[in-house]
Image: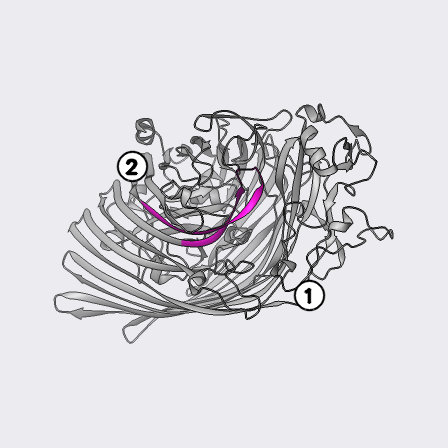
Amino acid sequence: MTKYFLLLAAAPLALAAPAHARDADASEPSAAQGAGPKKEVFSTGVAKGRDRLDQATSTSAIRGEEVHKLEPGSVAEIVRNIPGVRVEASSGVANNSYTIRGLPLASIGSKYLQFQEDGLPILEFGDFSFTGADMFLRADATLNAVEAIRGGSASTFASNAPGGVINFITKSGEEQGGSIQAMTGIGEELYRLDFTYGGRLSDTLRYQVGGFYREGEGPRATGYTGYRGGQIKANITKELPNGYIRLHGKYLDDKVPTYYFAPLRVTGTNDKPKYENVPNFDITRDTLLSPYIPTQVTRDGNNAVRSFDLTDGINPVVKSVGLEAQFDVAGWTVTERFRFADISGQMLQTFPLTIAPAAALAPSFAGPGATLSFATGPNAGQAINPLTLNGNGLLATSLLMNLQLNSLDNMTNDIRASRVWNLGDGKLTVTAGFYKSRQAMDTDWLFTSVIHDVHGEGRTALVNLTTATGVPQTQNGVFAYSALPATSAYRRRYDVNFHTNAPYGSLNYHIGKVAIGGSIRFNSGKAEGSIYGGELGGGRPVIVPFDINGDGVISAAESRSGFLPLTSPAPVDFDYDFISYSAGVNYRVAEELALFARYSRGGRAGATGPLFSPAHDPVTGALVDQADAYGLVKQAEGGVKYREANLTLNLTGFWASTDERTAQINTSAGGVTQVERIYRTYDAYGVEFEGGYQYGLFSVTAGATWTKAEIARDQFNAAVVGNTPRHQPDLIYQTTAQYEDKRFTVGANIVGTTGSYAQDSNQLRLPGYTLVNGFVQFRLTDAVELGVTGTNLFDTLALTDVNQPAIPASGIVTARALNGRTVAASVRFSF
């Protein structure tokens, strides 16, 4: 571990910088970035913006200009630079996984960590099945800053966010002017154009508009243009004598591929494994996506035959409008935020269930003597020798996962009022607010099972299987128009609305060097609607043979067709409530130094988690056990904050206990992909460091989080009690250093993690990794800037996930990895 702390001390940074000032509309640079010993006001997840040294919270911020220097390819690549936040950024632009300070990470999304845009959540729940909040969020030239609060008062100033809040804040015309930037990949096909412009229309009226568009194959080989789309955002602000009012809107339509599990060879032992690529497939540069698997033909949400274009990948469509206002009335500061978002789209991706030698896998589907032939691609119709197939001899059975997002519309409104009273020799701040939201979930799950080979460079092709007696078991590579052989389930429809109401309030008393505060939130929620699926039982059909191609004959694949019982829905009708609270004390020892301590309890609603499980009664719509409606997180933290003109240091100790009821996709000891039901309690404690230093034109910031976590209780699997949760490393770290003058900037950014376990059984190890990223900028004039950025410069194999608990007999596992080395060049014109 010593070498990692040495790395932190020696390596460069300026990203995870201490929070910039932002009270109402104001925005100021942080002290660590050369602003001098000034207040650092932070307003996300707290009652009222205050100097960080007067708050008993752990907060960070990243300025938009610092994000621009690294040109991150996804929200995940931004967020991983925030201390305490653990990110699995291997899916590409969207559907990555996020958690914080030892809280569990059972599935994709951000269950305990809420993503916000301009102070309101992207989705009410950040971990809808296969649908994370980052699907509907993009960073572009309109980004002003990213604010993050870890634990603390996030429990009471946001619903369903006990772990923290990450808020993406948009520019709003504070500075006159704008920019246009063109970027291209070097060694990869990806082209992107960003623009923004803002300023004043009058003395009291200002505006901002901007967005991006991109196109290309992307950093991994797919064989087609997988990136297609962009977004546009705009806002206009009217300044009033006693506040302001702002209208804003956004349109997002962006198609991106998902980099999901892929094969990897493993040798050695579970404790000391050696991972390497299989022949003709590089896990950091290839995918199982291909133009030779261009469409999915299946029955849709109305049981009609339909063809879907798999090259559309993840395609979110967001149309949102909102209002933000703040004004002073009779000594009270009233803040109102409202947004309605029309959200739809689809998610298409390939999920390999089994990848194994073709000579062994083919007979398991078509019996002894089974034969193989290509169903698609340039070799379509040709027989296959399973021993020499693509030089690796591998065959895969995969699910073409198709989620039609008919509606994820949400309406959110948050209004609060704060007032400061003189009380004795101190000041009492009183805040009261009310939050209301409605989140729709109208989605169809349309899974199809296919057989294909394993070939990189975007050349994966579908494969047909035939028995020794000549009976086809596939139809153009399709084994089943359902999720068979994995399960007869997963042909579903959700049509559910979630209502959340949450009054909240806080008191903070500041006298001399001491500030004492507490806050409380009462969350009440209701879920109502219907769900459809044969797996609900009650005589509902699951698999119904159907003539998909209309030739009058039911093939073997067509005999395995999924069916949605649309005439027999199961009701959803349950409600819940829970109380979240937080209390803390801050002691300002001196102008430069403060100590703080805080205890919090926050809740997180189960959302769709209980549905399609024994927790939900498909007859009444109620929950069998009300404990499935939500989970609680208890947290304690305490630390020290130090700030001088050019030096900022924060050190925080933390403890957390999390009750979780969820489902987790993994592989059983027998090698079968499964969805495991989990009822657990996790415990974690650790230490978090964040610091920044500036010396002349050189600056460095760094963050590190050491965590010790364990599974404290498990209702279904006592064998894992006492084990470390899967993917939980002892240490995560990030650091950036840069040298910047008027015409030239050069810097390096390092993110990394120590090793962890692939699964909760604590057998197979995932190795740690250190990624080195860099950036160079040349300002030819005040208006023209040339830039080069590089990610993973040393082309490190960085694994985030392995689906198997131990090395299988085949020596082949399915894994997810971060991208290999990528380099991009850009030119930006400012005006």
Q: Where does label 1 land, which residue? A: 566
Residue type at mark 2 is Gln
Residue 793 lies, with reference to residue 20, above or below; the image says: above
- Give the colour scheme shown: one colour
Estimate the x, y position of residue 329 in percent, counting from the top left. 32, 75
| Alpha-carbon span between mark 1 and mark 2 | 63 Å
Q: Is residue 244 visible?
A: no
**Which residue: 56% across, 39% down?**
183
**Which residue: 63% across, 53% down?**
489
Q: Secondary structure at mark 2?
A: strand
- Please state the total of marks drawn on the protein image: 2
- Badge 1 density bin: few <14, some 14–19, many ≥20, Cα 10 Å: some
Residue interval drawn in magenta: 660-684
Residue 548 lies, with reference to residue 261, above or below; the image says: below
In primary-sequence order, the first of circles 1 and 2 is 1
Magenta stretch, main secondary structure, is strand
Q: Is 504 displayed left or right of 487 in the figure?
A: left
Q: Where does label 2 land, which residue? A: 694
